[in-house]
Image (cartoon, rainbow, N blue to C red):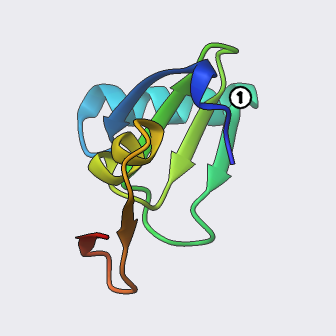
Amino acid sequence: MINAARVVAVVASDSAPAKRLMQDAKDSGRAIDCTCGRKTRCVVIMDSDHVVLSALQNETVSARLNGENARTDEDGGEENE
C-alpha cells in the first residue's frame, strides 16, 4: 500500500522516459518493486523521490487513488465493480 497523498504521478511503463526513470531509480536504490515477479505495467512517482513499480495498469492505479472501485482480474484485464 502507498499513501495516496504522497503520489506525484502515475505513468505507463512502456515509454522511453519511464524506462529511464525506472533504471535510474533501481541504480540509486529508490525503486520499490511491487510486481511480485510480473511484468511492470505502471510506475508511481512519489514525493519522496521513490519510484514504485506496479503490475497493475496505470488506469487501475489512478482509479484506486481517486477512490473509485476498480480492480483487475487474474489475466490482467480490468473490471469496475
Would you place residue 51 above or below residue 32 in this image?
above
Q: Quadrant of residue 49?
A: top right
Residue at (31%, 70%) from the top-left corner?
A: 81
Q: Quadrant of residue 14?
A: top left
| Residue type highlighted by circle 1 | Arg
Q: Position of residue 76 (x, y in %)?
A: 32, 76
Q: Position of residue 47 (x, y in %)?
A: 62, 13
Q: Position of residue 37 (x, y in %)?
A: 59, 72
In this rendering, position of residue 24 left or right of residue 67 = right
In this rendering, position of residue 69 left or right of residue 54 = left
Regarding mark 1 in the picture, which secondary structure is present there? loop
Would you place residue 36 above or below residue 69 in this image?
below
Which residue is under mark 1? 30
Which residue occupies the extreme right position in the image?
29
Residue at (70%, 15%) from the top-left corner?
A: 48
Residue at (40%, 86%) from the top-left corner?
A: 74
Q: Quadrant of residue 7?
A: top right
> Circle 1: is it few (<14), some (14-19), or many (20+) Cα within 10 Å?
some
Residue at (46%, 38%) from the top-left corner?
A: 65
Q: Nearer the viewer, residue 48 or 65?
A: 65
Q: Nearer the viewer, residue 29 or 79?
A: 79
Q: Nearer the viewer, residue 8 or 17?
A: 8
In this rendering, position of residue 66 left or right of residue 6 = left
